[in-house]
Structures are given as C-alpha cells and as structure tokens.
Image (cartoon, rainbow, N blue to C red):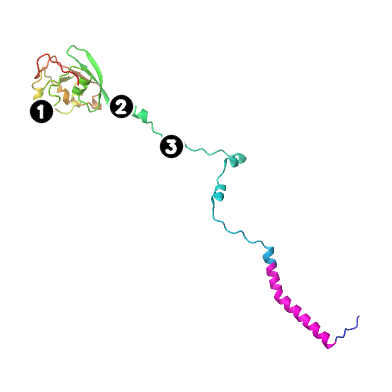
Amino acid sequence: MSPPVSLDERQLTSVTRAGYLQGSCSRYLHPLILTISVAFSIPASPPMLLSSPTSSRASIPTLETLKISGGKKPRVSQHVIFGKHHPFSTTAAENEQKEKISVTFIDKDGEEKHIKVPIGMSMLEAAHENDIELEGACEGSLACSTCHVIVMDVDYYNKLEDPTDEENDMLDLAFGLTETSRLGCQVIAKPELDGLHLALPAATRNFAVDGYVPKPH
C-alpha cells in the first residue's frame, strides 16, 4: 500500500479548484453536448412540399410504366372526344319517306297515276305538280267546284275532315256528285290517307270556256 500523499496548502487549493471547475463545467456542458449530439445524430424530417405538376404527374401511369408492369393502355371512348354519334343522314332520309304518302289518281279513261304527296299538301296542289288534269279555277279559295274528286274507298272518305258549309255549297254545283265527293283543294295529305285512290269526274262545271285545261303550276 502506497503511503498517503501529503499536500501543502497551495497544492490542496489548486486541486480543489480544478475539481470544482471540472464539476461545474461538466454540469453545464453536458446538456449542451448531449443536445448537439442528438441534433447531429438524428436527421430532421424533410419539409412538407406542396403538390406540383411533377409530383402529380408521377401518380399517372405512363406508357413506359404500363409496359413494364404488363398493364393495358387505357382506351379513350370516341363518345368522350366527339360526343354521341347521331345518324343524321339515315334519320333524315327516313323522315323524308315518312312525310309522304302514296296517292293514286284515276282519270276519266280509267288510267291510274301513282304519285307521292308530302304531308300537309292538298290534292289539288299535288295534281298540278304531277301534271294531272285536275282543274282549280279559283285556286283553292272555295269559289268553284272544278277540283271535284271522288274518293273511291268509303273507309278513306271517313278519315277525312268533315266538309265545311262553303265546300258543301260548291259540291252542290259539281258535275256527277256522289256520296264520297270532295273538293281536291280541301283534301289534305296526312299519314292516315296513305294509299288513297281518287277518281276524276268525266266532266266539270267551271267559269272557263269548255275544253279549257289548266296548266300545272
């Protein structure tokens, strides 16, 4: 066992001061050193970034990504780009056919002529457009009986609008009046009359010279 070391008063004072300073420094420096060590040893969390076109674009699968992953390329519907397809030409053609009806005119010699009449057109106008000799001295103003026609089928006659008093007055003047007689200017084409047959009387009573044939207009 080593003999005890004897220190004089100066040496004792120096040792005491050194120990005090060491204790004091370690007391104050230890937390600082610990804090610095922790700060440098633990990486800080990355700052929050706002979404950018680059980050948003990364979430959208590209063609290269789809090829690598074996996915299929998304299909873009033509309805989205061009809107819903409408068959305008086909529909227009069908409507044009539906807007006309078939009418047969039978002249005084028994000859038939088949024509197409647009919906809403009178039989007088249709006859003139197709070179059919149906007179119309008053041009459809209910002032004569020259556009007198005979409906050949009673069922079709019943589909017509009832004649007005003015039409009945003119029919009373018509030549060869029948139970199904009407004025051509008052018979208007409608879908229910498709297949209508009209006979022209053998003669007419008009305000013109006998034998006058009106020109189609």
Q: Which residue is mark 1?
A: 166
The mark nearer the N terminus, 2 or 1, is 2
Q: Spatial distance from mark 2 to mark 1, Cα to Cα?
A: 34 Å
Q: Nearer the viewer, residue 8 or 80?
A: 8
Q: Nearer the viewer, residue 55 or 99?
A: 55
Q: Spatial distance from mark 3 to mark 2, Cα to Cα?
A: 27 Å
Q: Nearer the viewer, residue 2 or 172?
A: 2
Boundaries of the magenta span: 8-36
Q: Amino acid at mark 3?
A: Phe
Which mark's residue is nearer the viewer, 2 or 1? 2
Q: Which residue is mark 3?
A: 82
For the residues bearing labels 3 and 1, Cβ distance under 8 angstroms:
no
Q: Which residue is mark 2?
A: 96
Residue 4 locus on image (x, y percent): 88, 84
SS at badge 1: helix
Q: Amino acid at mark 2?
A: Glu
SS at badge 3: helix
Which mark's residue is nearer the viewer, 3 or 1? 3
Residue 41: name its quadrant. Answer: bottom right
Query: In the displayed structure, would residue 209 be above or below residue 13?
Result: above
Q: Is 16 within the magenta?
A: yes
Q: Residue at x 73, y 77 (%)?
A: 25
Q: Spatial distance from mark 3 to mark 1, Cα to Cα?
A: 57 Å
Q: Residue at x 71, y 77 (%)?
A: 27
